[in-house]
């Protein structure tokens, strides 16, 4: 397959200011007539080249005259003698057999589109690249009984009935947009409606479209949408710009959601929620994703990407904005902990592995493979660092300038950074390395104290290991929030400082230090790096009790936990620190996160070679010790946080979380009282958070209640696909030794399906994240995942490719496991007819 390179970028030879699309919709066959007004871009002499994939071409006309042209491969080339023309193409497509879920496809009786990144070419011939912006007029015609609702981008301008039982709707989107933001939906859908009055007084009609029975489950998403709309006005000065905003939820979707202009399409898991079917984490994820897609209206839609190498321009910035939004809705500290946990679990391993790439990559084979944690989450961290360096006013001035300067354009990450610099006067020359360099910087920090001089020195040095294609790394600019605490008084010694480390090493001086200091480093996780320091276990325990930055306080306890998992020594200081945190009187949500041990995956990442079984044994032993030594405290926490009735407030969510963390520790020793308590909670819970938490702790146990709970859960939710996903996941994540066999059996369960990405992720994706059981020494986990990759690749290459990366981590494991993983990768690469999606990840993983 061909490699696409940033260095080969050229502006389009032809612009397409106007597009008129006419869809004659049917699940088996849809006819698409496209009229493109095309204009030569400056002095370019090339013919018009249109992308098209899987289209049956019926006819082509240039200025009304039929042309005898045929596509070659996946392009259709049309000679145009003058500087402009109207090109009309007619194609047939087959939504019902579109299992890739890209382009126009059928899901749950409806027809819907997904065009990002390159799906529009599966609908009609078009220059399918983000720097071609067009105004769209769209007519949809369909059977009125099967598809009573017809939606597209923008505003509805006309509707009509036809004598044959069909009907039509005409939509106009006044805002020029790239083809990846096109959307259309036809279905038997019902709306949850509302309105929003913008800051300037315009009323916007809002609707979330779902199956009629699901309408009551849309209230939370609607509330989140309205909160997001106001938040963007207040925090970024951004107002919504159409009369309507529609959201449609679909059951089959490759990703979380899609920000199509005025017509967002969502994976139903990020819309549908009520207390009986969704956990607190689901509710939070819904609000975050609704906000994320809404915020794209400015960061992505009004200002879009010049090319797909600039993907982080919209994704990193929009994730940063959704993180800020979520932080404003509840505990900012807990949100930051969650963001960092996700970064460490998903992005750090990617940055240390064979697919490591900068947030602005240089090349790709398949762009769908680059919707990664690096582009999204590290991209957000890079924006956050700029916000830290510029300060709140400088950052806001920077985004204001960016919106003013580039509204209506397709731009680059460089354009964004320049706006930041120009508005703030802050030089970001060295900072730009973050866009071009892959890998996670390591920072070494040591503190010395001169009691006589009353000074302390913080000695910092940074390194960045080579990554594929980047053997030598420049020095990075690291914004580090640091503070010192008095080891005797426990007080902060002076103000927090923002250190901008621009050298390979530096010493930071502190004055008036009268007692031995303990350093609080990278507070708030101000830079996305790995910190190694000379802080002792006692220092970490001290910070876990005294640090006034909540993230740093959490981090101190996590590092103590990590040290405990990696040593075989005494763990009493950890147990004591957890006990003290339980008694700290801090917010329940914070305590719940702080007292959890790092995951096996996280601890494994810190080892030269992951000791799969040793780590599992050690972590379980430490958990049992924490469970038994603090047994009375866990019971007290469990009972004290029992709510009388369900509420969805931040406080109630925090209490549920802490109570369920307590239940996990109580279950660590599998004792009869804890099992009975978990089963009772499972049976009597009035909400999914508590029911699922109980099922989760039971899933690891050998008690007979486990199977009873799993069976009851399945029976209760047999008709709810999103909840059944949880049933599959909880079994795939079980630490029980029989999990590999259980997962193999679940692959043949009547409710399992290779074609639904949510179900696939719920079973195979969850299993691949179960470090101790996926990495079973006999290689059965690797074989199962590779088999799934090959089975899914024939249906949905994007979904298949996402399952490959766990096998790409072979260098991190012992020789026997590495050989087994490589063998599966080799088997995948040798398979005939492999998609370029899977080929790219599997072949790069073998290097
Ligand atoms: N911008 C959207 C990306 C997306 C996507 C990418 C590849 C294949 C399918 C997809 N569906 C949506 C989602 C977002 O970041 O908001
Ligand atoms: Zn996005």
Image (tube, helix red, strand yellow):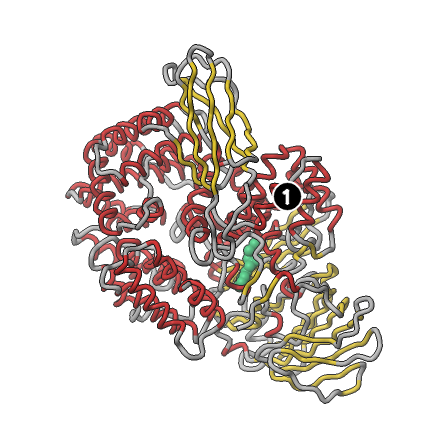
For the residue pair 287 and 78, the one nearer the viewer reads as: 78
| Left or right position of 220 against 645 | right
- Residue at the spot of label 1: 232
Q: Vertically, is 721 above or below 273?
A: below
Q: Residue at x 36, y 33 (%)?
A: 591
**Residue placed most toward the observer, 260 or 80:** 80
Q: Is residue 191 visible?
A: no
**Which of 788/540 is in front?**
540
Which element carries disc 1, helix, strand or loop?
A: helix
Say left or right for 482 vs 816: right
Judged from this view, the residue extending furthest toward the right is 82
- The picture places residue 714, in percent across and down from the top left corner, at 30, 60
Q: Position of residue 785 (x, y in %)?
A: 34, 66
Q: Residue at x 51, y 25 (%)?
A: 508
For ligand 2, which image quadrant applies?
Answer: bottom right
Q: Where in the figure is residue 482, as x and y percent of width and height?
A: 49, 28
| Quarter of the figure that contains the C terminus | bottom left
**Residue farthest left in this picture:** 672
Outermost residue toward the bottom in this view: 68
Q: Percent from the top left, x then y, of residue 218?
A: 51, 54
238 lies above or below 445: below
Q: Is residue 49 above or below residue 332?
A: below
Q: Is residue 651 visible?
A: yes
Q: Is residue 460 above or below residue 598?
A: above
* Label 1 Cα crowd, 10 Å radius (few <14 / some 14-19 / many 20+): many
Quarter occupied by residue 423: top right
**Identity of the residue furthest to the front in this view:** 472
């Amino acid at each position: 397959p061909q490699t696409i390179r940033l260095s080969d970028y050229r502006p389009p030879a032809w612009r397409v200011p106007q597009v008129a699309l006419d869809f004659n919709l049917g699940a088996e066959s849809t006819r698409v007539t496209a009229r493109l007004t095309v204009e030569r871009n400056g002095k370019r002499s090339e013919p018009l080249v249109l992308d098209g994939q899987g289209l049956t071409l019926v006819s082509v006309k240039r200025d009304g005259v039929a042309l005898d042209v045929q596509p070659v491969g996946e392009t259709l080339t049309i000679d145009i003698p003058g500087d402009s023309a109207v090109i009309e193409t007619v194609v047939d497509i087959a939504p019902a057999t579109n299992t890739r879920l890209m382009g126009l496809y059928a899901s749950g009786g409806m027809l819907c589109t997904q065009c990002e990144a390159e799906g529009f070419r599966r609908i009609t011939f078009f220059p399918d690249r983000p720097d071609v912006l067009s105004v769209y007029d769209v007519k949809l015609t369909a059977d009125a009984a099967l598809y009573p609702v017809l939606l597209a981008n923008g505003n509805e301008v006309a509707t009509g009935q036809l004598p044959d039982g069909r009907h039509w709707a005409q939509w106009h989107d006044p805002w020029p947009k790239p083809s990846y933001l096109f959307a259309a939906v036809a279905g038997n859908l019902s709306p949850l409606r509302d309105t929003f009055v913008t800051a300037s007084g315009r009323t916007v009609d809002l609707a979330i479209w779902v199956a009629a029975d699901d309408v009551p489950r849309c209230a939370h998403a609607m509330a989140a949408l309205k909160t997001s709309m106001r938040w963007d006005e207040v925090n970024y000065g951004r107002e919504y710009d159409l009369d309507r905003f529609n959201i449609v939820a679909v059951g089959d979707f490759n990703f979380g959601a899609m920000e199509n202009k005025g017509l967002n399409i969502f994976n139903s898991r990020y819309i549908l929620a009520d207390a009986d079917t969704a956990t607190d984490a689901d509710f939070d994820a819904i609000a975050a994703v609704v906000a994320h897609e809404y915020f794209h209206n400015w960061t992505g839609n009004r200002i879009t990407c010049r090319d797909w190498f600039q993907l982080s321009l919209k994704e990193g910035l929009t994730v940063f904005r959704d993180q800020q939004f979520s932080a404003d809705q509840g505990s900012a500290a807990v949100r930051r902990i969650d963001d960092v946990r996700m970064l460490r679990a998903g992005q750090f391993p990617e940055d240390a592995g064979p697919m490591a790439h900068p947030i602005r990559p240089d090349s790709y084979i398949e762009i769908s493979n680059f919707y990664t944690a690096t582009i999204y989450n590290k991209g957000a961290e890079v924006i956050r660092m700029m916000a830290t360096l510029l300060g709140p006013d400088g950052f806001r001035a920077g985004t204001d300038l960016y919106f003013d300067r580039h509204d209506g354009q397709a731009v680059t990450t460089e354009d964004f950074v320049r706006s930041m610099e120009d508005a703030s006067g802050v030089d970001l020359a060295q900072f730009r390395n973050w866009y071009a360099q892959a890998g996670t910087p390591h920072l070494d920090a040591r503190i010395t104290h001169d009691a006589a001089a009353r000074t302390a020195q913080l000695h910092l040095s940074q390194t960045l290991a080579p990554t594929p294609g980047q053997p030598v790394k420049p020095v990075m600019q690291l914004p580090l929030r640091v503070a010192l605490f008095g080891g005797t008084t426990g007080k902060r010694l002076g103000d927090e400082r923002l250190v901008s480390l621009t050298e390979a090493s530096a010493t930071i001086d502190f004055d008036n230090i009268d007692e031995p200091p303990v350093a609080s480093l990278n507070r708030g996780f101000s830079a996305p790096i790995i910190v190694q320091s000379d802080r002792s276990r006692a220092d970490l325990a001290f910070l876990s009790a005294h640090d006034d930055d909540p993230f740093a306080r959490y981090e101190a306890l996590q590092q103590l936990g990590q040290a405990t998992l990696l040593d075989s020594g005494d763990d009493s200081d950890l147990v004591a620190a957890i006990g003290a945190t339980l008694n700290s009187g801090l917010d329940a949500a914070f305590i719940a996160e702080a007292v959890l041990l790092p995951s096996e995956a996280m601890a494994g990442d810190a080892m030269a070679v992951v000791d799969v079984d040793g780590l599992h044994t050690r972590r379980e032993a430490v958990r049992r010790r924490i469970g038994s030594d603090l047994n009375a405290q866990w019971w007290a926490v469990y009972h004290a946080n029992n709510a009388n009735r369900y509420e969805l407030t931040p406080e109630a969510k925090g209490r549920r979380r802490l109570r369920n963390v307590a239940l996990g520790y109580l279950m660590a020793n599998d004792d009869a009282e804890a099992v009975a308590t978990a089963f009772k909670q499972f049976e009597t819970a009035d909400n999914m958070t508590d029911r699922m938490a109980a099922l989760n702790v039971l899933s690891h146990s050998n008690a007979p209640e486990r199977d009873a709970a799993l069976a009851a859960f399945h029976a209760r939710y047999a008709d709810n696909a999103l909840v059944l996903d949880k049933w599959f996941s909880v079994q795939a994540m079980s630490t029980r030794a029989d999990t590999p066999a259980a997962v193999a059996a679940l692959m043949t369960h009547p409710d399992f399906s290779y074609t639904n990405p949510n179900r696939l992720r719920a079973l195979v994706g969850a299993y691949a994240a179960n470090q101790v059981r996926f990495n079973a020494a006999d290689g059965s986990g690797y074989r199962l995942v590779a088999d799934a990759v090959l089975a899914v690749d024939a249906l949905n290459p994007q979904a298949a490719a996402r399952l490959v990366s766990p096998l790409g981590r072979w260098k991190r494991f012992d020789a026997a496991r590495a050989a087994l993983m490589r063998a599966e990768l080799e088997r995948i690469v040798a398979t005939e007819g492999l998609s370029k999606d899977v080929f790219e990840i599997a072949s790069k993983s073998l290097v």
